[in-house]
Image: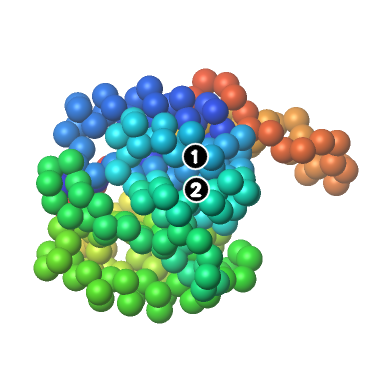
Amino acid sequence: MRIFFIGDVVGRSGCVAVSQRLPQMIADWKIDLAIVNGENAADGFGITEPIYREFVAAGADAVTLGNHSWSKKEALAFIEHAPRLIRPINYIPGAPGCGSALVETKNGKRALVVNALGRLLMDPVNDPFGLLDREIAAHPLRETVDAIVVDFHCEATSEKLAAGYFCDGRVSLVVGTHTHVPTADHRILPRGTAYISDAGMTGDYESIIGIKKEEMLRRLTTGIPSGRFEAANGVPTLCGVAVET
């Protein structure tokens, strides 16, 4: 099975990259399972229903989120009828939506996609490891599902790597998201799980992690805000990771 995961989509530039390039990549690479992290797709913060539909129309089998899941308040409502939209599994109980989804792949197989938030340097959430363990145990790889992908949305690379080893041998791919900077540590872990600390960002790379440089530079150099952060909308770059299992 060929799996393609697109790293954090930021702003309109990132959305254009997905819409214009993903369909052809699916055809050329014969991708069976395409996943997009869309938590920053709407102006750099959150996601809207039209953007979610746009990703699905481009060929995404699942769209994962992260700590900005609810930055666009409409997501609290439309996630309930968006079965391929997956918010972190370790949100406080009662949060709308689901932290995992069983999807049919393009080659007729069955895949489990799970989204989890780390806890180091992040807002307080429930334990991701116990919930991952429960979800993976309920859908054993190569028994009830043909592939399992875990999007571990987290600041600290140490926690991401811990998630990789925690899931090693039980899932197909553990992919880190959130920092918007692609890492060069892609590897196959000892028990066969593919791993990368961060799949990078899909959007305008002439920016600071997808945000227009001017306001970010002002705040970092003077400590004084002059406006809100806005997504950069220049030439888009698509960044992600592809795995064959």
Q: Circle 2 sits on which residue?
A: 78
Badge 1 vs badge 2, beta-carbon distance below 8 Å: yes
Taking the spot 15% from the left edge, 66% from the top edge, the residue there is 144
Q: Choose between 148 and 164: the one closer to the eye.
A: 148
Q: Is residue 10 visible in the rendered structure shown here?
A: yes
Mark 1 highlights which residue?
49
Which of these two is toward me, 187 or 65? 65
Amino acid type of the residue that numbered disc 1 sits on in the rendered structure:
Glu
120 with respect to 182 (left or right): right
For badge 2, the amino acid type reads: Phe
Nearer to the camera, 62 or 189: 62
How many residues crowd around disc 1 within 10 Å: few (fewer than 14), some, or many (20 or more)? some
Image quarter of residue 57 = top left
Q: Is residue 105 above or below residue 56?
A: below
Question: Where is residue 155 shown, x and y percent of the image?
Answer: 55, 59
Q: Is residue 61 left or right of residue 46?
A: left
